[in-house]
Amino acid sequence: MARESESGLPIEPVYGPDDLAGWDAAEKLGEPGSYPFTRGVYPSMYTGRPWTMRQYAGFGTATESNARYKQLIANGTMGLSVAFDLPTQMGHDSDAPIAHGEVGKVGVAIDSVDDMRVLFGGIPLD
């Protein structure tokens, strides 16, 4: 007895070879590193390219965060994930009344492209 997905599609309790009749694996599944990328974006995936070790970090200002990112990279971090403060995540400038008391509390405050330049200044982005 099938149940339905959230999209209204039937989901059978068990699938077998007969359920794949007419299904073109080359079209639907593809090869690793090729469209439709269901098997990954790189041909050898993580056997040839190790996982990126990322550090989630962000301090009150772009300058403070930049210094931390440089320290992390110097100590072996292979990638960065920026922790933005709540006003930045919500698209508010730091001087907006709704941002009062929240600026820089749980991450870096970014209000402009110049802030982003400071945040990533001197850090290789490749």
Image (cartoon, helix red, strand yellow):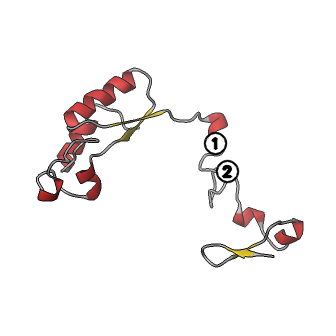
Residue drawn at x 18%, y 50% is 111
Q: Quadrant of residue 76?
A: top left
Q: Are marks 1 and 2 in contact (CB under 8 Å)?
A: yes
Q: Secondary structure at mark 2?
A: loop
Q: Is residue 95 left or right of residue 105?
A: left
Q: Is residue 2 left or right of residue 67?
A: right
Q: Which amino acid, mark 2? A: Pro
Q: Position of residue 21 (x, y in %)?
A: 85, 72
Counting other residues with Cα less than 10 Å from the Cα at mark 2, is it few (<14), some (14-19), or many (20 or more)? some
Residue occupying image coordinates x 26% and y 32%: 66
Task: Give the Cα distance between marks 1 and 2.
Answer: 7 Å
Bin the neighbour count of mark 1 within 10 Å (Cα to Cα): few under 14, some 14-19, many 20 and up: some
Q: How many marks?
A: 2
Q: Which residue is mark 1?
A: 45
Find residue 57 and report its image quarter: top left
- Residue at the disc numbered 2: 32
The earlier-in-sequence mark between 1 and 2 is 2
Horizontal relation, residue 88 to residue 16: left or right: left
Q: Nearer the viewer, residue 26 or 111?
A: 111
Considering only vertical position in the picture, is 23 above or below 97? Answer: below
Image position of 12 with respect to 78: above or below: below
Q: Amino acid at mark 1?
A: Met
Q: Residue at x 67, y 50 (%)?
A: 32
